[in-house]
Image (cartoon, grey):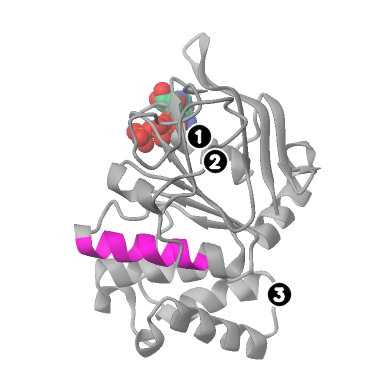
């Protein structure tokens, strides 16, 4: 499903004033594409993901998923849309310490009311897809950092979302494991036709992205990260620029 943030503005209370975290941000992300969001600390990257995830309602603007404005839904419908359509892999999405990798996924299916047999099959398929078929019965402390991150990604896909939102997926990993997780996100995006939006600090990750958007002080900055060899240049912020040099396989 296509994600279209249409002139989204978000402010937070800041003493007796308001701090503008997102200032009329417009972007479009398509199915099967990976959009990387970069920018300095405090520029609004996490806020953008939180709005797209319907975790925060913007002050103004629309959050359109396949033309449906999620920002305009009441709380109940937003929760349902989030559960059914959006996979969230955030830095803070910690695994539950006492549950096995398989059970981390089954909890999500249970909350969505998926029958157990179907859920178990799907969870095993997903753990297989992220390279953890042999670790299904391990608890988080028995897994490496990269493996835990893979479980988090599999969990984010458990309800077959169309939109995958990922915040700094490799921040706690060394370079090699970070690149493996990045490859995984790239592959799942292509294979499953996900609309993926990923915040990253690491410029070397941009090679995996189809599009790169830079945000500065809550605004999309001149379209693209022009110094990047991967983005094809600046333009209308609404028109994301295809990356170059990516091996799509
Ligand atoms: N709940 C909040 N209340 C008030 N201000 C907030 C809140 N969350 C974020 N902000 C402010 O909004 C701005 C954007 O924050 P945001 O977390 O989106 O930035 P970011 O680009 O993700 O930063 P980082 O890279 O450091 O994680 C910052 O000035 C931040 O201080």
Mark 3 or 2: the one toward you: 2
Would residue 55 be visible to someone looking at this image? no
Q: Is residue 171 left or right of residue 14?
A: left
Tags 2 and 1 touching, CB below 8 Å:
yes
**Alpha-carbon span between mark 2 and mark 1:** 5 Å
In the image, is the residue at mark 3 within 8 Å of ligand 1 by its beta carbon? Answer: no
**Residue indicated by mark 2:** 50
The circle drawn on residue 47 is: 1
Q: Image check: 176 left or right of 129?
A: left
Q: Is mark 2 within 8 Å of ligand 1?
A: yes
Q: CA distance from mark 3 to mark 2?
A: 25 Å
**Residue located 78% across and 50% down the image:** 77
90 falls in the magenta region: no
- Position of residue 8 relative to residue 231, above or below, is above
**Secondary structure beneath label 1:** helix
The reply to whether callout 3 and callout 1 are in contact (CB within 8 Å) is: no
Q: Main secondary structure of the magenta part?
A: helix
Residue at 24% x, 72% y: name it: 144
């Amino acid at each position: 499903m296509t994600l279209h943030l249409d002139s989204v503005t978000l402010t937070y209370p800041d003493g007796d004033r308001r701090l503008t975290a997102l200032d009329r941000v417009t972007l479009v992300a398509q199915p099967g594409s990976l959009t990387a969001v970069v920018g300095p600390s405090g520029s609004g990257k996490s806020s953008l993901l939180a709005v797209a995830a319907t975790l925060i309602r913007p002050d103004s603007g629309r959050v359109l998923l396949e033309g449906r404005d999620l920002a305009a839904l009441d709380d109940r419908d937003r929760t349902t849309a989030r559960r059914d359509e959006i996979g969230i892999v955030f830095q803070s999405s910690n695994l539950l310490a006492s549950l096995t990798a398989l059970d981390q996924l089954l909890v999500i299916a249970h909350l969505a009311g998926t029958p157990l047999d179907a859920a178990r099959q799907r969870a095993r398929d997903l753990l297989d897809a992220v390279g953890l078929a042999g670790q299904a019965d391990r608890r988080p402390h028995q897994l490496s950092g990269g493996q835990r991150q893979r479980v988090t990604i599999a969990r984010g896909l458990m309800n077959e979302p169309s939109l995958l939102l990922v915040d700094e997926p490799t921040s706690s990993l060394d370079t090699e494991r970070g690149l493996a997780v990045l490859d995984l996100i790239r592959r799942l995006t292509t294979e499953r036709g996900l609309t993926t939006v990923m915040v990253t600090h690491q410029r070397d990750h941009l090679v995996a992205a189809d599009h790169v958007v830079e945000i500065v002080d809550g605004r999309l900055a001149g379209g693209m990260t022009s110094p990047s060899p991967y983005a094809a240049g600046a333009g209308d912020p609404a028109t994301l620029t295809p990356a170059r040099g990516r091996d799509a396989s």
